Image: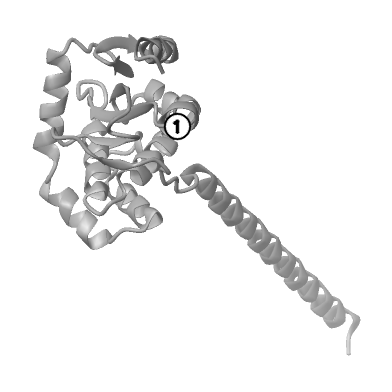
Amino acid sequence: MSVQSTRGRRVKAAKQNNLLYLYIAVGVVAVLALTALIVFLTRNQGEVKTPTAPVGRTAEGFYYKGNPDAPVKVIAFEDYQCPGCAFFTRSLEPILERDYINTGKVQFIYHELPLTNIHPNAVAAAEAARCAGDQGKFWEMHSQIFANQSIWAQLSSPLNTFSGYAGIVGIDRAKFDACMQAGTHREAILAAAQSAAELGVQATPSFSVNGQLVDSSRLFTAIDAALRAADR
C-alpha cells in the first residue's frame, strides 16, 4: 500500500469526522432552541386561573365574579388589546380579587369596550372570551388572552392562537371554533362598546364604582369610599 493512498484515506476519514461533529453540534443547538421556545411559550401562556368567588352573567349579558348582593358594583370597561388593561388584569386585579371580590365586598363586572380604530384584534379577543364563556370558561379565557397579549396582538389573524388557548383552558375546541367563525357574539360586543360610549367612557381601562366613573389610579380609593358609605 502506498503512502499516498494511506494519507488520502486518513484525510477523508478526518473530513467525515469533522462533518459528524458538525451535524451533532447543529442538532444540539436545534434541540436547545426548541426547548427554549417551548419554555418561552409555556411561560407566556400562564396558569389557568379559575375564580373562587361566585361567577355568572348580569341581566344585560355581562360576565361577573363576586357576590351579586355585594354592596359595591365595579364595572370594568376594557379592551383586550389595550396594554393598560393587560397591566391592570395581571398586576392589580389579583389584589382586587383577594381583598374585595373574594371577601364578598365587590361584584366585579366585565364590560367590553374594543377600540376598533387602534386595536384591530380587540373584537376577536372579546369574542374568544365570550365563546369560552358559552362553555363555562369565560374568566379562564379572559386571563389567557391578557397574559398573552403581546403574542396575539401582533398577528394579522389571531383565531388559530385563540383556538389554542381554548385547548389550554379545557373546552371543546370544535365548538369554540364554530362559535368564532359564526361571529356568535360580535353584535353583542359592538353593542357593549356603543353603550359604554353613551355612558361617557372615553378611555380604557375605566371603571364604574357604584355609578361613579374612575380610572385605575383611583379605583381602590373609590371602592373604599363606597364601602364606607355602605357602612361596610
Q: Quadrant of residue 191?
A: top left
Colouring mode (rainbow / by chain / secondary structure / one colour)? one colour
Whole-percent x, y for residue 92 in the image: 47, 24
User: Is 56 positioned to the left or the right of 141 in the image?
Assistant: left
Residue marked by disc 1 = 103
* Residue occupying the point 25% across, 44% down: 128
Q: Most extreme residue toward the bottom, as rendered? A: 1
User: Is 191 positioned to the left or the right of 219 in the image?
Assistant: left
Q: Most extreme residue toward the front, as rendered? A: 231
For the residue pair 95 and 89, the one nearer the viewer reads as 95
User: Is 190 positioned to the left or the right of 201 in the image?
Assistant: left
For the residue pair 213 and 56, the one nearer the viewer reads as 56
Whole-percent x, y for residue 89 in the image: 42, 29
Q: Is residue 144 above or below residue 114?
A: below
Q: Is residue 168 above or below residue 10?
A: above
Q: How many marks?
A: 1
Q: Quadrant of residue 3?
A: bottom right
* Residue occupying the point 62% across, 60% down: 31
What amino acid is at disc 1?
Thr
Quadrant of the rendering where the C terminus is positioned: top left
The residue tagged with tag 1: helix, strand or loop?
A: loop
Whole-percent x, y for residue 204 in the image: 31, 18
Whole-percent x, y for residue 99 in the image: 49, 27
Q: Quadrant of residue 168?
A: bottom left
Quadrant of the rendering where the N terminus is positioned: bottom right
Badge 1: few (under 14), some or many (20 or more) residues near its Cα, within 10 Å?
some
